[in-house]
Amino acid sequence: MEGKGYRLEPITTRDSSQVIQFLRKFFFKDEPLNICVGLLDEPGSTCIELETYCLDSIPDGVSLMAVSPDNEMLGVCINGVLRREENDKSNDKEDDLQNCTNQKFKKILNLLTTVGKDSDVFGQFPEIDSCVEIRVVSVDDACRGQGIAKAFFDQTKKVAKEQGYPLVKVDCTSHYSAMAVSRLGFHCIYTLNYSDHLDEEGKPVFVPEPPHACVKTYVMHVN
């Protein structure tokens, strides 16, 4: 897909190293939850668990990147496929959570696991057995305002439809991403206020800077 000053291409496993370098520069340090738990507080620090979480989605074959005419990466959209039979194997996700040794990332993984379970997409939509989940959207700071993020969402819907997935889902941890997704016509099916997501002492696990107050799950049917 061609855009003004860029084109969209599928991400393959061959692009993994370049994708991670891009996310290290433009996404990991700016994401509200990463900031909230101090995931990458040290200069030059990395989080292998977070990087693995992103890379694990690429083999599903539904991720996208925006590329300039001279082949410079301008943005990435990491998408994955959710399947009912895999979603029913909740023990696997619990094992991943228990086996996570990075305590800061474990807090984020626990939140995402909770949201995935409680939003219950397959329970709310019993007629579907699979869907595409938008997991990470990041655009080069210098290229924002060019419509790249919207193009990612539009192309993801197209890819989902072409590959036979009836629904696109996205969990928004940022107030701004939730507003953007809503404007694109996605429908909110679940909300979790950060003030209601508590640790063992009854205190909120995440207290992000305003206006970030909740996680919202949005969906759109593409068929």
Image (cartoon, rainbow, N blue to C red):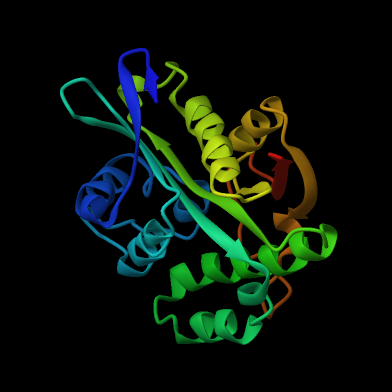
Quadrant in which the N terminus appears: top left
The outermost residue toward the top is: 4
Instruction: Name the spot of residue 34 as percent of width and height, x first.
Output: 45, 54
Q: Quadrant of residue 53?
A: bottom left
Comparing 171 with 155, the one in front is 155
Examine the rendered structure and indicate whether residue 1 appears above or below residue 78: above
Q: Residue at x 18, y 29 (%)?
A: 71
Of residues 55 and 12, the one nearer the viewer is: 12
The number of numbered discs placed on residues in the rendered structure image is 0
Residue 21 on image: x %, y %: 22, 48
Which residue is found at the position 71% from the left and 65% from the top? 197
Q: Residue 109: x, y in percent?
A: 53, 68
Q: Quadrant of residue 40?
A: bottom left
In the image, residue 40 above or below residue 48: above
Q: Is residue 123 left or right of residue 210?
A: right
Q: Could you tell whether 99 is left or right of 168 in the image?
A: left
